[in-house]
Structures are given as C-alpha cells and as structure tokens.
Image: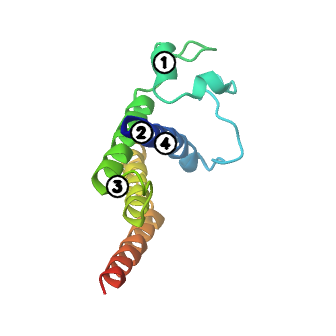
Amino acid sequence: MNAIIYFFMFTMGAVLGSFYTLAVYRIPLKQDITHTRSYCPKCNHKLNFLDLIPILSYIFLGGKCRYCKEKISIQYPVVELFTGIIFAGIYYKYSFGLTEIFNVNILFLWIAAALCIAMTVTDIKEKVIFVIHTYILAVLGLVYNFFNISLQN
C-alpha cells in the first residue's frame, strides 16, 4: 500500500513538473498557460494524450517530437523526474502513517517546492526570476510559520 501512495505522489509531482516546463516556456512569451493545449514548439502540432505522459513519452519517443521528429529538450523529463522525486520525498518525510494522506506541512512544502523549481528553471532558461514568485514564497513562509506557531500553543 505504501508503494502505491509513493508512486501516486511521484506521479503527481511529475505531472506538475510537466506543467512547470510548459509555464516556463510560455510565460516569457506571454502565452496562455491554462487554456491552450500543449503543442510542439518546433512544428506547433497540438500534442495528444500519449505525447504528454511525463517522462515516459520522452523515453518512448526517443526524445523527439512524434510529428516533426525534432529533438525535445532534455529539460522536460529532467524537471518532471526531479519534481516527482521531490514530491514523493516530501511526502515520505512529513507523512505520519497511512491514515493521514495529506497534512498542512506537506501541502505548504509542495507549494514552496513548486515555486522554487519553477524559479530555478526560469532562471536557468531565461536568466530572470519573477518578483511575484519571491513575494509568494515570502508570504507562504510567513503563513506557514504563523500556522506552525499557532499549532504548538
């Protein structure tokens, strides 16, 4: 049962990692990140479900677009894999048995990890860190700290 939960946590992280790479690509181009379907940045072909499976699609397609055969950046599966490992690791560290699948620590840490990963990838690709990300992290840290202090009293 534990393995299934950790696999689910890894998969959830990998899916979110896939979204982060999409956001990192589209936000600097001022493109929509929620309503426009994923597409190949080289040939602009809309990707189908089998093209969007984190990590596995990259492996099965040999790191190339199914439609134009252009190479896909290794960044995509690396961020997906790393995010999956981070999410599963956070769950492992902060879960307290199978009766409590989610707790506040896990949720806050997942959000912080997501922001840090998105910031890191954006910085590597675009050489920029958006101020809004740092503000969100600062507020998140303050809320988390306040919440933990209030739980201890």
How would you rate the neighbour count of disc 3 (Cα within 10 Å): few for under 14, some for 14-19, many for 20 or more? some
Q: Nearer the viewer, residue 133 or 150?
A: 150
| Tag 1: amino acid | Lys
Q: Which comes sooner in the sequence, label 2 or label 1?
A: 2
How would you rate the neighbour count of disc 4 (Cα within 10 Å): few for under 14, some for 14-19, many for 20 or more? some
The answer to whether the residue labelled 1 contacts the one labelled 3, judged by CB atoms less than 8 Å apart, is: no
- Observer-side mark, 3 or 4, equals 3
Decide: is 37 above or below 32: above
Q: Which residue is mark 3?
A: 95
Q: Which comes sooner in the sequence, label 2 or label 3?
A: 2
The answer to whether the residue labelled 2 contacts the one labelled 1, judged by CB atoms less than 8 Å apart, is: no
| Tag 2: amino acid | Phe
CA separation, marks 3 and 4? 16 Å
| Tag 3: amino acid | Ser
Q: In terms of secondary structure, where does tag 4 sit?
A: helix
Q: In terms of secondary structure, where does tag 3 sit?
A: loop
Q: Residue at the location (39% across, 42% down)?
A: 83
Decide: is 102 above or below 83: below
Q: Which residue is mark 4?
A: 12
Q: Which comes sooner in the sequence, label 4 or label 1?
A: 4
Image quarter hosting the N terminus: top left
Q: Position of residue 142 (x, y in %)?
A: 37, 77
Q: Which residue is mark 2?
A: 10
Q: Which residue is mark 1?
A: 71
Q: Residue at the location (37% across, 59% down)?
A: 109
Q: Position of residue 18 (x, y in %)?
A: 50, 38
| Tag 4: amino acid | Met
Q: Which comes sooner in the sequence, label 1 or label 3?
A: 1
- Observer-side mark, 2 or 1, equals 2
Is residue 77 something one can see in this rendering? yes
